[in-house]
Amino acid sequence: MPRLSTLIIGTCLMKYIDQTNVVTFEHIKMLGLKNLGMTIDHLESFLRVMPSLTRLQLNGNGNFLDGHRWEKFIAKHLPLLNKFQFCFNENRVKQWDFPDMQSIIESFRTIFWLNTKRWFVTCEYNLYSPKSIQLYSNSLDESSLKTKFKSKTISVTTFKATKAYNDSFITIVYDRIFFNFTKLTLNDQQEISNYSLFRKMKRLGLKFGADRPTIDWISFISKCVDLTTIARIIMTDSVIFNNHSDIFVDIKRFLRQVCKINSLVIHDSSTNKSFSMTANIIRSIIPCHVRYLTVPMKNLDEIKILLERQTNLTCIKFFINQTQCLNDFNQWLNTKTNDMSYEIENGSLTVWIKKNHKIESSEITVSNKRMKLSDDRYD
């Protein structure tokens, strides 16, 4: 079949491959194997006969979780491969834990995976089925090969896009950890407390729903994460913007426990942007050691109050849904001293506040006006 370019096998079971008289099929460009029932050695022997593959899809159970081994094999035997989609499941007698997941995902954090091929992967397990683990490529078509775990998952990923954080209730990306409280219950809290402390994390993400979490989320996070290394916290969602006074008290109490935080991001990801944050609320919750703040604001008056009364912040990024407000800021700032510089872009206003120390600056154009801005910009 010299014209065959695509081969898809629904169930692939293979115990032995005779290597004495191997014939190569260089005309096959795309291969899909579902329900794999073979070892990694047999799979590699099978793939060697198709050196011209440009696309490969794999799905099955077994020990296919070594990124270093895949890297060496693909570089040597599948040099033309530009799209690799897979979903592997492995079961074992012993429970998987976070160090196991970290070890697996580390093998996919190489130049080959992240830069050369730009293939990103996620490793996850279900909290209530800890003897099973799943590894899948983030480019995978969910309708084709992947059978995703039913929620209640803890994920470690090389994929940085925030949409990857929505499915699991705990997601780890390098030195960043994200908690999704819309999926966390009291039973989950008790189950997770049996696992090891997440250490050496520098960024912490907290996603809330429309209501205050029913669990003691402050105590829960304190038990899960070593807070002494957290430098940046990102908070979403609508409960923060619905004037829930209890959540503000919670946030204030929690932030006091994070002794090294210097950056705080409060973000409303909903499509209905109500922007109910006020300057007084913000000033009441952020500790004095926070230097960089990102927050949505109601109007220009609230921005003015925060800028005039703050004493510790060096950079603030405001999101606001009033274009006129951003335009009026130009006029208001002209009446002030030159201890602030700013940039208006895409519905946001970033203000750098000069302190007593010397700040090296660069120039940009804002509203047809050249402004001096600090190089130390807040992302």
Image (cartoon, grey):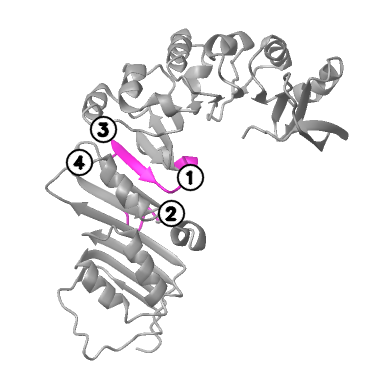
Q: Secondary structure at mark 1?
A: loop
Pick whichever, 307 or 295, lies toward us. Answer: 307
Between marks 1 and 4, how big is the CA–CA gap? 24 Å
Q: Is residue 176 magenta?
A: no
Residue type for callout 4: Pro
Query: Badge 4 local density, few (<14 within 10 Å), some, or many (20+)?
Result: some
Between marks 3 and 2, how big is the CA–CA gap? 25 Å
Between marks 4 and 2, how big is the CA–CA gap? 23 Å
Q: In the image, 12: left or right of 184? A: left
Query: Badge 1 local density, few (<14 within 10 Å), some, or many (20+)?
Result: few
Which numbered disc flags the more N-terminal residue, 4 or 2? 2
Vertical placement of residue 379 versus 258, above or below: below
Which numbered disc flags the more N-terminal residue, 2 or 1? 2
Foreground disc of the pair 1, 3 = 3
Vertical placement of residue 116 versus 196, above or below: below
Pick whichever, 90 or 12, lies toward us. Answer: 90
Residue type for callout 1: Lys
- The residue under label 2 is 120
Pick whichever, 317 or 174, lies toward us. Answer: 174
Part of the protein shown in magenta: 141-163
- The residue under label 3 is 196
Which numbered disc flags the more N-terminal residue, 3 or 4? 4
Between marks 2 and 1, how big is the CA–CA gap? 9 Å
Which numbered disc flags the more N-terminal residue, 1 or 3? 1
Q: Secondary structure at mark 2?
A: loop
- The residue under label 1 is 160
- The residue under label 4 is 130
Query: Badge 3 local density, few (<14 within 10 Å), some, or many (20+)?
Result: few
